[in-house]
């Protein structure tokens, strides 16, 4: 038998192949580092159609967004802890809005976007950089100022100084009508809505965070919302005088469901003097403000009311104010035991402040006129007949409603509800307000036609009200 020879691969050739492989690896460029600015630019470009208007982007600081509260807090953040918390809040605003913008895209258009984890890593890098760099942080404080929801060019082109007296007379006429209102008599024409039963949690003094904001625990906040949730009395003059909620049908068209009586809620803060106060905001919707005729200036699709409760340290109402979702008809109401003092500031739009008979520890009953849903009266009377209940939901639900393509915002990228424009915009455009009369998103309520004001400005109330020196 012949011995079988084992064939051996030449060692020299193995060495050459090995060296060639190493050379190829060495020549291959390493993956480029992740570029946060490029990632955010790509994300913003991809989500331009679903951009959420709630917050203001800090374009020079990708990953951060602001609102009027944070714009007011930035300059006063004195300690390192307060400054870091302020930066984290800017990042939290961006995280929230980015998640909504991503979710409001059709699934196919989400592919290839930077991941939520990658963007979050970039946000935290931004926070750390600004926490270490005082000069850059001062630039961020300046960039956090939210632009006014007014168009200066419209005021210039529309000869605003000539239109201003007309606006003043119209506002004064409405306030005279409101001041002349008497308590409505209860009758079967009023449809009554009661709030859901709230938890009976004791309201201890609320702790403050490093920025000075009262911060309730979730159970405390739920108890406060339950304590101050308004009762509603709505005159039934048409089918549009029932509470409901907007939704999208299977064809993607916006509809209105009167069987789902909902009051949307969120909380915020206002500064009176040097002290911050917790606020509770309740918003409800009607299907429309019916048009009396084809040229009705104020009628149109969707209508509603926002009711805001500013609290004292004990969780009682210090002040109420109300506005329509268009930003119109801002009115103040003082509980009987409120220590606040009203003053009309120079240069600000004339306001009306009424002192109520109810005390700050009582939930208010709101009496709304049928049709235009004007707030006629506020007291503590409860309905004498059977009532319908309403549910409460987070206001942010409207930014991400179910839709055939997944989810969709009630608002467009300008913060307006499409299709709710009114004919009054052709008379009021010289005020500079974008589409006067249209329903709009929180943070977009320009609330004055004389001068400038924003409903979400934390210093707005402080321009009209003051506390006695002993309570400042």
Image (spheres, rainbow, N blue to C red):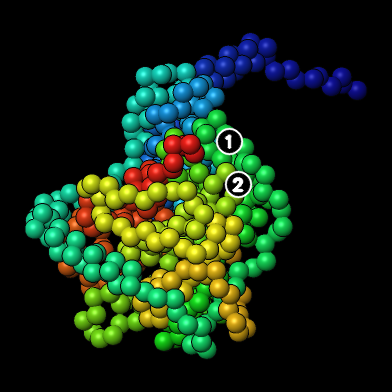
In front: 333, or 8?
333
In front: 337, or 266?
337
Q: Quadrant of residue 69?
A: top left
- Identity of the residue drawn at 51% across and 54% down: 337
Residue at numbered disc 1? 208
In front: 39, or 166?
166
Drawn side of residue 448 relative to residue 195, left or right: left
Q: Residue furthest bottom?
A: 188
215 in relation to 86, above or below: below
Drawn side of residue 423 relative to residue 222, left or right: left
Using the numbered discs, state the Cα–Cα distance from disc 1 to disc 2 in whole angstroms. 13 Å
Q: Give x and y (percent) for residue 372.
A: 36, 77
* Crowd rating for badge 1 (residues with CA inside 10 Å; few <14, some 14–19, many 20+): few
Q: Quadrant of residue 198?
A: bottom right
Query: SS of the residue at dot 2?
Result: loop
Residue at numbered disc 2? 314
Q: Give x and y (percent) for residue 237.
A: 41, 87
Q: Give x and y (percent) for residue 374.
A: 38, 73
- Identity of the residue drawn at 54% across and 47% down: 312
- Identity of the residue drawn at 41% across and 71% down: 375
In front: 88, or 192?
192
Drawn side of residue 49 relative to residue 314, left or right: left
Q: Which disc number belongs to residue 438?
A: none
């Amino acid at each position: 038998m012949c011995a079988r020879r084992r064939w051996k691969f030449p060692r020299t050739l193995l060495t050459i192949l090995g060296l060639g492989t190493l050379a190829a690896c060495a020549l291959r460029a390493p993956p480029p580092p992740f570029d946060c600015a490029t990632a955010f630019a790509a994300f913003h470009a991809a989500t331009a159609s679903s951009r959420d208007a709630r917050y203001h982007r800090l374009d020079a600081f990708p990953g951060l967004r602001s609102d009027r509260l944070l714009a007011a807090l930035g300059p006063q953040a004195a300690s390192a802890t307060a400054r870091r918390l302020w930066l984290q809040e800017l990042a939290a605003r961006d995280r929230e809005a980015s998640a909504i913008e991503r979710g409001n895209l059709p699934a196919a258009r989400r592919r290839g976007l930077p991941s939520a984890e990658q963007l979050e890593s970039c946000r935290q890098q931004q926070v750390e950089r600004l926490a270490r760099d005082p000069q850059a942080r001062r630039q961020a404080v300046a960039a956090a100022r939210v632009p006014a929801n007014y168009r200066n060019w419209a005021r210039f082109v529309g000869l605003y100084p000539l239109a201003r007296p007309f606006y003043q007379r119209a506002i004064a006429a409405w306030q005279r009508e409101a001041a002349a209102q008497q308590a409505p008599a209860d009758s079967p024409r009023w449809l009554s809505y009661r709030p859901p039963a709230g938890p009976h949690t004791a309201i201890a003094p609320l702790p403050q965070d490093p920025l000075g904001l009262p911060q309730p625990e979730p159970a405390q906040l739920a108890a406060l919302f339950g304590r101050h949730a308004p009762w509603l009395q709505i005159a039934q003059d048409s089918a549009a005088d029932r509470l409901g909620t907007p939704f999208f049908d299977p064809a993607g068209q916006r509809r209105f469901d009167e069987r789902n009586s909902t009051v949307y809620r969120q909380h915020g803060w206002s500064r009176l003097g040097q002290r911050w106060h917790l606020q509770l905001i309740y918003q409800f919707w009607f299907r429309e403000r019916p048009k009396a005729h084809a040229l009705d200036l104020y009628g149109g699709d969707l209508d509603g009311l926002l009711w805001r409760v500013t609290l004292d340290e004990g969780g009682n109402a210090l002040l109420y104010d109300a506005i329509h979702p268009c930003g119109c008809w801002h009115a103040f109401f003082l509980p009987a035991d409120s220590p606040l003092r009203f003053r009309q500031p120079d240069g600000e739009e004339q306001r009306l402040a009424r002192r109520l008979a109810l005390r700050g520890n009582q939930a208010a009953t709101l009496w709304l006129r049928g049709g235009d849903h004007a707030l006629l009266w506020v007291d503590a009377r409860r309905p004498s007949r059977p009532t319908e209940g309403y549910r409460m939901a987070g206001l942010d639900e409207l930014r991400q409603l179910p839709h055939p393509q997944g989810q969709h915002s009630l608002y467009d990228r300008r913060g307006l509800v499409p299709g709710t424009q009114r004919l009054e915009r052709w008379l009021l455009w010289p005020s500079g307000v974008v589409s006067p009369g249209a329903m709009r998103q929180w943070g977009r309520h320009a609330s004055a036609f004389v001068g400038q004001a924003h409903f979400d400005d934390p210093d707005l109330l402080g321009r009209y009200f003051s506390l006695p020196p002993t309570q400042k």
